[in-house]
Image (tube, rainbow, N blue to C red):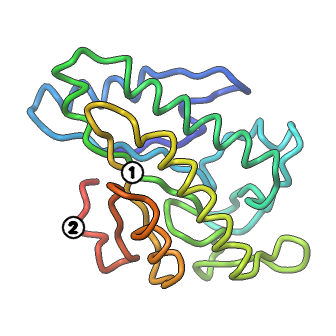
Amino acid sequence: MTLGWNNIELSNGSFTWTALDNRINGAAAEGLWVMPLVYTGDRAPAWLYANGVPEITTDFQGGSSFPYYPDATYQAFSRRMIAAVADHLDTAYPPEVRARIIGVQCPVGASGDPVPYKNSSGNWFGSGPSFIDDPTWDAFQQQMFTAYYDTYKSRVPRIHPLFNSNFSFGLTDYAVDTLRGAWLKTSRIGDRYQNN
């Protein structure tokens, strides 16, 4: 099940959980296992840009905004959202529903894909001041993977973070060697075998 960050944090620091709760409770009532995904990228809330996060606009889907991911303010807001979602998943449900939350998908880029931006031509790494080179992007992904992992690693019952390393050998090795108990997929090869 998926939601945009802009659906749960409508204003800075103010979270609303109704849509997420309805989906989780509905899935659990059907006896399904749950692995939510909160999209960032073009589904990041607009208030970010009024609070110091640089906005990158593209022609994706007729016009979209994306955060500039290396920005420290963006990363702080993103980490706060990750922690708020984890705390809610861990404490808001009765035990029989909480036991059905087995994982969380951990998107760090555009539309859940491990690239920074999208435009009408597809995946895009920006240009000029918005450009993000491969080493910077890999370092950002590693930092965010670690933030998700650290947030979820002690939850009982376990909530496994699912990462997409997109065939980056360095990122895959990092996840396998460092993020014990996390789940990993590599781009489209695992896309239709995950629990969306």
Residue sticking out furthest to the left: 31
User: Disc 2 designates what residue?
Assistant: 193
The crowding category of the residue bearing disc 1, from other C-alpha atoms within 10 Å (few below 14, some 14 to 19, many at least 20), is many
- Left or right of 134 in this view: 183: left
Residue 125, located in which quarter of the rendered image? bottom right
In this view, the residue in front, 75 or 3, is 75
Dot 1 or dot 2, earlier in sequence: 1
**Residue drawn at 59 percent across, 64 percent down:** 142
Under tag 1, what secondary structure? strand
Rendered-image quadrant of the N terminus: top left
**Residue drawn at 54 percent across, 70 percent down:** 114
Q: CA distance from mark 1 to mark 2?
A: 15 Å
**Residue drawn at 46 percent across, 53 percent down:** 106
In this view, the residue in front, 40 or 151, is 151
- In this rendering, the answer to whether 79 lies above or below 55 is above
Q: Position of residue 102 (x, y in %)?
A: 25, 42
- Count up the numbered dots: 2
- Left or right of 71 in this view: 167: left
Amino acid type for the residue under numbered disc 1: Pro
Under tag 2, what secondary structure? helix
User: Disc 1 designates what residue?
Assistant: 161
- In this rendering, the answer to whether 16 lies above or below 151 is above
Q: Position of residue 51 (x, y in %)?
A: 86, 37
**Front disc: 1 or 2:** 1
Marking on residue 126: none
Q: Position of residue 186 (x, y in %)?
A: 38, 76
Amino acid type for the residue under numbered disc 2: Tyr
- In this rendering, the answer to whether 60 lies above or below 22 is below
